[in-house]
Image (cartoon, helix red, strand yellow):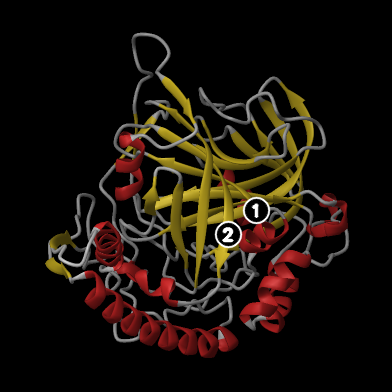
Amino acid sequence: MKQPAPAECDAPPPVAPFHDGELAAQRRAGVAAAAAAFGGRGIRTFMPDQHRAFFAQLPLLVVGGVDGGGQPWATLRAGAPGFVSAPQPRTLDIAGGTLRGDPLEGSWRIGSLLGGLGIELHTRRRNRVNGVVASIAGDAMSVTVEQSFGNCAKYIQGRTPTPVPPQAGGAPPQRRAARLDAADRALLARADTFFIATANTSDAAGGARGVDVSHRGGPPGFVRVDDDGTLTTPDYSGNNFFNTIGNLLHDPRAGLLFVDFERGDLLYIAADAQIVWDGPALAAFDGARRLVRLRIREVRRSAAVLPFRWSAPRFAPQFAAWGDAGARSLASRAESAAVGGSATAIVSVTQAASAGRGESAEWPESSVSLKVLKASEASEASEASEASEASEASEASEASEASETPETPETPETPETPETPETPETPETPETPETPETPETPGVAGACVR
């Protein structure tokens, strides 16, 4: 049963949860009716008790905001469990936790829009909260909640954190640049997780005005470094809200955050986004419904600032059969690099072919050699293959998105490989129909969001 708004929270009446950009994206994908039906039920104006307890136990919080120039940034706050609390259903308090090099440090004001994502990687649980800063004391803030909703465990790689002492020897190094360097490119090439902040701060957005910060997960290679100034990443199926893409249609500026889980580095990227809705380019990424192409404007990297290190990932079951995303990306890069009709190359790719099990589980090796043909042959073969795959993906997407309901996360990309039930240490079971409006059910993280 859906938890009613407690009397003490004085929650305002529900408002339309989507702005024009989100509605336009929903219409283009053919899911406007489904999104409207679920959005009115699943997006609350207060935090249910389960969410309040969840935020209070977290050692870190993903935060999205905009700086003085309107650029969105995704950042992390970290502290002992309890540094984030929810004393009332419509109040979220953040007791500091700012990390060195945070691009939003000094930008917060009373009235600033804030997007929050509570995520517990070792259980793959996450919940969302968006609101307005009501008070500030140093780097501590109190936020009035305007939107609260759950997300499912889909696409989250499980990791167990271990606290580490502060780095000795003074402040860790920081770097600011206009382009990626070799270390940045290496981190992106192996990334399986990132966070993205977007915003619609227009008064015309009404009750849907705000900042959004979202999780993105995929197999290593799902963030393609096209050059030191451009990235491409797939947009997979989700709950059809289109919070991120809807904001980008209104304002193409995005803030990306990549975490080096082994070293504790944080890589911040400010970029302008372009949505690739269809076409042969989608075939480079298994399961992609759309692509997001990002042109980098600024890069910031803070070394060893996180007070945690994480275990090896336990990969989300959705990626067990999507192991060739990285292979295709590398093949595409190799084809582009082959200059002249006689160029031939062999690319050997270690593919991810398992969901992974246990603390130290790694993706097993399945080496696949990809031959780059002569330029003319490669072009013809690639165009025929991509056109065929894009057509099949488009037809599957239209059929599945029309029937997709957020309570039942689908996996149309791998119908032959049912999702593997969660391991004992991972209490969530995304295969079970999600019921975000019943927060009293332990472990239900809500709708799958994109």
Local secondary structure at mark 1: loop
Residue at horizontal 71 percent and vertical 31 percent from the top: 141
Residue 327, placed above or below residue 84: below
Quickly name the residue at label 1: 252
**On the picture, is 293 further left or further right than 108?**
left
Q: Residue at x 67, y 71 (%)?
A: 25
Residue at the spot 22% in from the left edge and 67% down from the top edge: 354
- Toward the viewer: 269 or 119? 269
At label 2, the amino acid type is Gln
**Residue identified by numbered label 2:** 274
Q: Position of residue 302 (x, y in %)?
A: 44, 27
| On screen, residue 63 above or below 265 | below
Q: Quadrant of residue 420?
A: bottom left
Q: Nearer the viewer, residue 144 or 380?
A: 380
Decide which of tag 2 and tag 1 comes sooner along the chain. Answer: 1
Residue drawn at point x = 87 percent, y = 57 percent: 204
SS class of the residue under badge 2?
strand
Q: Quadrant of the N terminus?
A: bottom right
Label 1 CA crowd tier, 10 Å (few <14, some 14–19, many 20+): some
